[in-house]
Every structure is written in structure tokens, then in C-alpha cells.
Image (cartoon, helix red, strand yellow):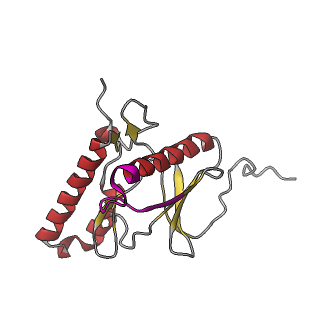
């Protein structure tokens, strides 16, 4: 047998069309139209599973406080065994990508709606003691009507509990 150096590389079995990847998960569009976030395999698998479990807990906290809220991607399910999070599909992708591809065509009133929606989402999160910790245009998603919704709570913190990490130093929570 030839040692090609690949025997220790974790394998991810695709579940659908690849939409993106993050620190904790691979994001895929399922054939049924929903999105699945699956934890990475390998050395960091347990931390990735914990991030997705935290994300599911935060979605549950949002739902308990507000029901289905217009400012958050709709949470569908969490599989505790596989640590997979199932979410609503957002066909216009991230605000970051949308701005890059349509920047010149976006009206001033549309931009103001997005800013207002982002502020409303942050206010709602903070009212239930959730700190996003990676609040950026890559985690602000757009539905078919260009309505902005917040997603990706894997690195978020619930006040009194630690976060597993941050997107970048710009998003670190304040230290007490």
C-alpha cells in the first residue's frame, strides 16, 4: 500500500448542493429545498458539534421569545445525534455577496431597509441576552423578496456563558 498522505483527511459525504462553508460547518441545499448545516469531521469535530448545538439552542431561545421572527432565518430542526441544523433556504444568499454582485443597482431606500432590519435583529437578540459575535454581511442573508434575515449563531454567546470563538477581532464581545 502506498502512503499518499491522505489517509488522515476527514471525509464529508455530500447531502446536497454546496452553498458554503464556515468555521464549524458545511452548508448545503437539500433536494427538498431546505438548508442543512453539518459539522466538520476530523480533529475539531466535537467543537463543531458544540457550535451547532449552541446555534440550535439560540434559535429555540429566539422562537420562545418571539415566535417566527421576520429578522431571523427560520429554524426547522436540529438532529441531536448528527448535530445537523436544518434551516430555511435564502435564495439571494449573503448580503456581502449580493452587494458585490448588485452594488450599483441597489437603491438608497433598499439599503436603509437593510440597515433598519439589521438594527432590529440586534435589538431583538440583545433583549434575550444573545450576543452574535460574528455579526457581518456574510451572516446577513436575503430571502426571495430581499428581506434581510440574520443567521449563523454557532459562535454566539448567551450572556453568562462563553462563546466558542469569534468571526474576527471586530466582533469580540466586551470583556467584563
Residue 124 percent coordinates (x, y)? 27, 49
Q: Extreme left residue here?
A: 108
Q: State left or right for residue 12 relative to residue 61.
A: right
Question: Residue at 47% of width from left, 46% of height from top?
Answer: 57
Question: Residue at 27% of width from left, 43% of height from top?
Answer: 127
Front-lying residue, 38 or 41: 38
Residue 19 percent coordinates (x, y)? 48, 66
Q: Extreme top residue here?
A: 176
| Residue 129, quarter of the rendered image | top left
Q: State left or right for residue 118 relative to residue 149.
A: left
Question: Residue at 32% of width from left, 61% of height from top?
Answer: 149
| Residue 172, quarter of the rendered image | top left
Q: Quadrant of the C terminus?
A: top left
Residue 6 part of the magenta segment = no
Q: State left or right for residue 45 relative to residue 35.
A: right
Residue 33 percent coordinates (x, y)? 51, 74
Residue 72 part of the magenta segment = yes
Q: How many marks?
A: 0
Question: Residue at 22% of width from left, 54% of height from top?
Answer: 120
Placement of 17 over or under 65, stated as above or below: below
Residue 64 percent coordinates (x, y)? 39, 50
Magenta segment: 63-77
Placement of 50 over or under 152, stated as above or below: above
| Residue 150, quarter of the rendered image | bottom left
Q: State left or right for residue 162 relative to residue 112.
A: right
Amino acid at each position: 500500500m502506498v502512503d499518499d498522505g491522505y489517509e488522515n483527511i476527514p471525509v464529508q459525504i455530500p447531502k446536497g448542493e454546496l452553498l458554503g462553508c464556515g468555521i464549524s460547518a458545511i452548508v448545503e441545499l437539500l433536494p427538498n429545498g431546505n438548508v442543512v448545516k453539518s459539522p466538520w469531521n476530523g480533529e475539531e469535530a466535537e467543537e463543531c458539534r458544540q457550535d451547532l448545538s449552541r446555534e440550535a439552542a439560540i434559535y429555540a431561545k429566539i422562537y420562545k421569545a418571539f415566535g417566527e421572527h421576520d429578522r431571523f432565518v427560520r429554524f426547522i430542526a436540529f438532529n441531536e445525534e448528527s448535530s445537523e441544523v436544518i434551516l430555511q433556504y435564502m435564495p439571494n444568499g449573503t448580503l456581502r455577496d449580493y452587494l458585490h454582485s448588485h452594488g450599483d443597482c441597489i437603491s438608497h431606500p433598499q439599503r436603509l431597509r437593510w440597515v433598519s432590519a439589521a438594527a432590529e435583529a440586534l435589538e431583538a437578540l440583545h433583549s434575550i441576552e444573545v450576543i452574535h459575535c460574528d455579526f457581518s454581511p456574510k451572516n446577513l442573508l436575503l430571502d426571495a423578496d430581499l428581506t434581510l434575515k440574520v443567521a449563523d449563531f454557532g459562535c454566539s454567546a448567551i450572556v453568562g456563558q462563553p462563546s466558542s470563538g469569534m468571526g474576527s477581532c471586530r466582533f469580540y464581545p466586551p470583556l467584563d
